[in-house]
Amino acid sequence: MSIDQSLTASDIGIFRKGTTITPLSQVKTPASDRGFVVGVSLLGGHTRRIFHQHHATSHDFTENSIYIRDLSENYKADLSSGFDFLLFELPDASLNKFAEDAELSGVSSLSVQAASKDIVLANLARALIPALERPEEASALFVDQMTTAIGTYLVQRYGGRPPVAKSRTRVLSRAHEKLAKGIFSDNLEGDILISDVAEACNLSRGYFIRAFRETTGMTPYQWLLSERINRARELLLTSNAPLAEIAIVCGFADQSHFTRVFSSIVGTTPGTWRRSS
């Protein structure tokens, strides 16, 4: 593999696999109890011939096309060209958990797909590429938030259940908002899971995410990142601490990580902002 990356998440296995070598050998995967795997094609031009019990089908994968495989079934396919896929492995227990979060209890499987176009899923998946490329900088909260969004979308789109009527707007109580923000502020590095905060508020994970966004206008990770930058600005103004020290205090992996994030949000580097302020 010319690309072989992975990322740790609580409910979904996240991988990126790619190769430019052609021709490729046949792939065989025996049936297992690992649940489902979802692949998102980051590039076009990949083709594969999938062998079923009594016939075979050929599929051309364009950019942003996907496949969904039930891992409880044997799989055999000829891969005839290079590929670059983001892969998500969902155990059955995680699928049930996402279904409950989406208020779709009873969803226990996903509809099998091959080379179907799905821009929404592709965009959600692509948001995880920087975390795969620099896992040491990846916030556990961000990864958890994105995998929750991906898992929820999958059960809603491919779970085979009719959509639930849109419920009324949900907001956090003042006590829950204060508690959640306090927990996030105490974990600026982002090494906390949304399920932990939701449990502290005695709410389901799905309800908490929607209510937090409705209450604050931001996702949990967006709010946390805003707090990191606010604290960094305060330290830049009120102390002579080196940028590397401020980076660590504010939950960034190192000064380089701090500079990239600060510049993308504020529009200038921390050093330049400190001097001009």
Image: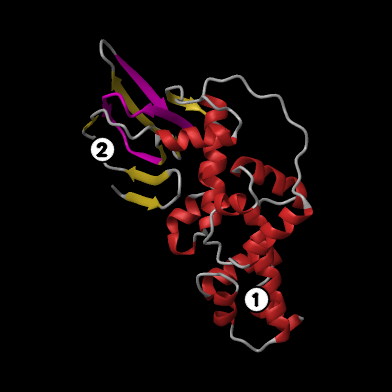
Residue at 43 percent across and 57 percent down: it is 133
Q: From this viewpoint, which residue is outermost toward the front?
A: 202
Do tag 1 and tag 2 residues touch (Cβ < 8 Å)? no
Residue 120 screen position, x and y as percent: 58, 35
Q: Nearer the viewer, residue 227 or 57?
A: 227
Secondary element type, mark 2: loop
Residue at 21 percent across and 33 percent down: it is 25
Give the mark, 1 or 2, whose residue is nearer the N terminus: 2
Question: For residue 122, which numbered disc appears in the image?
Answer: none
Residue 80 screen position, x and y as percent: 28, 30
Count the labels in the image: 2
Compared with residue 94, is residue 200 higher up or lower down, i.e. above or below? below
Which residue type does callout 1 highlight? Pro
Residue 31 screen position, x and y as percent: 26, 28
Q: Nearer the viewer, residue 37 or 1?
A: 37
Left or right, 188 with reference to 43: right
Residue 50 screen position, x and y as percent: 30, 22
Residue at 28 percent across and 11 percent down: it is 55
Front position among marks 1 and 2:
1
Compute the Cα span from label 1 to label 2.
46 Å
Question: For residue 22, which numbered disc appears in the image?
Answer: 2
Q: What stretch is highlighted in magenta?
A: 56-85
Position of the C terminus by quadrant: bottom right
Which residue type does callout 2 highlight? Thr
Residue 79 lies in the magenta-colored region: yes
Residue at 56 percent across and 62 percent down: it is 190
> What residue is shown with label 1?
270
Residue 93 lies in the magenta-colored region: no
Q: Is residue 38 visible?
A: no
Left or right, 271 with reference to 75: right
* Residues packed near mark 2 inside 10 Å, few (<14), some (14 to 19) or many (20 plus): few
Secondary element type, mark 1: helix
